[in-house]
Image (tube, rainbow, N blue to C red):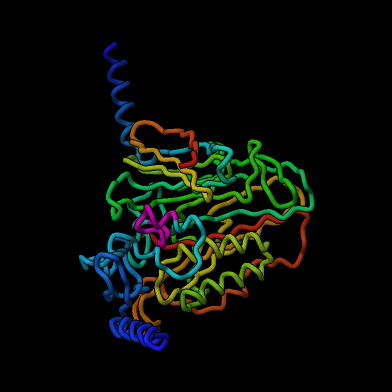
């Protein structure tokens, strides 16, 4: 029992110490939205000057994407030409989040 | 009465015009209801670090534009996503977190000093419905940073070629396959290239793609993206990496008969000052004409894959 507990703790520590994690997802949208959306990945900062953009990718509706990141706090934003939006804050540490990026008209 | 009215109107215009202030060089006149007319600095096109994006107009407390990012006032046409990106991100006009002369690499996982942003893979096929597998076949671990569509652990995109120039993966149609990747600098070449101004560098790359018969759509995508994302420095040296460099660095297997795969990745090195051959620089200035090393595209194949990308050095 002790052995199991220790090995669980060790594997948890190894997982959280990993230097690469994945944020992936699928883009969905309302019928009033466009056929493609830009998915933006930045640091999760409220201050404009600190909200550094790391990557962005143009994804067709129904399409999928993946970002490889270091463990940390991120924002995933999606937007399209018709003014539809999606926003999510993420703490990426011990697991690899998969997002349903649902754009909605604002 | 009419004469009086005419005189009054003329006088009104005269007094209004004389009250308008003339602004010195480098300044422009703005008007707001609360402050009235005042001179503020014109948009400054000098290259700036992301943290300096508000530029010289930020410290002026009465400047009505001071709370807006200055890129919004760029007069040139920008695609919709660039306007939106400017609203949220200070480094929209850079390929990532930036510190001259390159990308701040500690923000990203993986290895390799070359940050290849947006290699896009396009197809031109005579078949309108043909299965394909596009496999990254390297035995070494590749340092991907982003992909669309999602790349499975097998590192294979599988699907159908649709309507002569599109990919269908998991029932969704993509105009192109996209990935960002880090690459080892040692696998790139830095002897062949050209150095020129920023605008001419973009024009040179567009011409190079045309020479390799990239489709109009792919060239349009290139121009739309990179006119926004190449930082605003005066000069650039372009070091093109073609199949000779890219096949060993990012080996790819495509299991479709009678196909070709033309690859071009432009490594860009910015220079703030006029190029001076006597100056010591991190990456040596190119000495050979790269156009002689372009992949040969004279033989037309049934299915032609083409890939373009732009890369920057990480520090």
Expressed as whole percent of the image width and height from the top left, the position of residue B219 reads 61, 64
Residue beneath the point at 59% across and 45% down: A35
* Residue B77 makes an appearance in the image: yes
- Residue range highlighted in magenta: B84-96
B120 to the left or right of B233: right
- Res B184 seen here: no
From the top left corner, tell me how far across and down residue B48 is, in percent: 32, 68
Q: Position of residue A40 (x, y in %)?
A: 44, 48
Q: State yes or no: residue B179 in magenta.
A: no
**Quadrant location of the C terminus of chain A in the rendered image:** top left
Of residues A72 and A82, the one nearer the viewer is A82
Vertical order, A3 against B247 (above or below): above
**Residue at figure coordinates x 57%, y 74% from the top left:** B290
Residue B45 as seen in the image, left or right of residue B127: left
Residue B172: which quarter of the image?
Answer: top right
Q: Quadrant of the N terminus of chain A?
A: top left
Residue at the outermost front position: B1
**Number of marks in the image?**
0
Magenta stretch, overall SS: loop
For the point 71% across and 66% down, the residue is B297
Up/down of B87 relative to B159, above or below? below
Residue that lies at the very extreme toward the top in this rendered image: A1
Of the pair B50 and B60, the residue shown nearer to us? B60
């Amino acid at each position: 029992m002790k052995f199991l507990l220790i090995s669980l703790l060790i594997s948890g520590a190894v997982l959280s110490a990993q230097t690469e994690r994945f944020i992936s997802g699928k883009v969905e949208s309302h019928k009033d939205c466009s056929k493609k959306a830009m998915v933006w990945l930045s640091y999760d900062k409220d201050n404009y000057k600190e909200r550094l953009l790391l990557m962005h990718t143009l994804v067709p509706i129904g399409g999928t994407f993946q970002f490889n990141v270091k463990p940390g706090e991120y924002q995933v934003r999606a937007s399209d030409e018709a003014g539809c939006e999606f926003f999510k804050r993420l703490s990426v540490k011990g697991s690899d989040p998969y997002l349903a990026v649902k754009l909605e008209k604002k | 009465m009419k004469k009086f009215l005419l005189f009054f109107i003329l006088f009104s215009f005269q007094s209004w015009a004389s009250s308008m202030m003339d602004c010195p060089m480098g300044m422009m006149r703005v008007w707001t209801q609360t402050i009235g007319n005042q001179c503020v600095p014109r948009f400054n096109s000098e290259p700036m670090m992301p943290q300096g994006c508000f530029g010289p107009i930020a410290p002026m407390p009465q400047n009505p534009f001071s709370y807006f990012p200055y890129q919004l006032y760029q007069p040139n046409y920008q695609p919709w996503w660039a306007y939106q990106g400017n609203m949220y991100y200070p480094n929209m006009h850079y390929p990532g977190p930036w510190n001259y002369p390159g990308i701040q690499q500690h923000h990203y996982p993986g290895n390799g000093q070359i940050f290849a942003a947006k290699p896009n893979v396009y197809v031109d096929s005579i078949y309108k419905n043909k299965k394909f597998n596009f496999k990254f076949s390297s035995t070494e671990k590749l340092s991907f940073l982003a992909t669309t569509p999602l790349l499975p652990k097998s590192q294979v995109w599988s699907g159908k070629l649709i309507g002569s120039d599109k990919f269908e993966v998991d029932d969704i149609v993509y105009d192109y396959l996209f990935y960002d990747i880090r690459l080892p600098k040692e696998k790139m070449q830095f002897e062949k290239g050209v150095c020129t101004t920023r605008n001419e560098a973009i024009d040179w790359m567009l011409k190079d793609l045309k020479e390799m018969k990239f489709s109009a759509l792919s060239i349009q995508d290139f121009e739309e993206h990179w006119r926004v994302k190449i930082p605003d420095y005066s000069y650039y040296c372009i070091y093109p990496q073609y199949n000779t460099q890219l096949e060993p660095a990012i080996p790819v297997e495509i299991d479709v008969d009678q196909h070709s795969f033309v690859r071009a990745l432009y490594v860009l090195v910015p220079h703030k000052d006029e190029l001076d051959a006597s100056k010591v620089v991190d990456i040596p200035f190119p000495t050979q004409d790269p156009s002689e090393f372009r992949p040969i595209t004279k033989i037309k194949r049934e299915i032609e894959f083409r890939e373009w990308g732009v890369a920057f050095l990480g520090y």
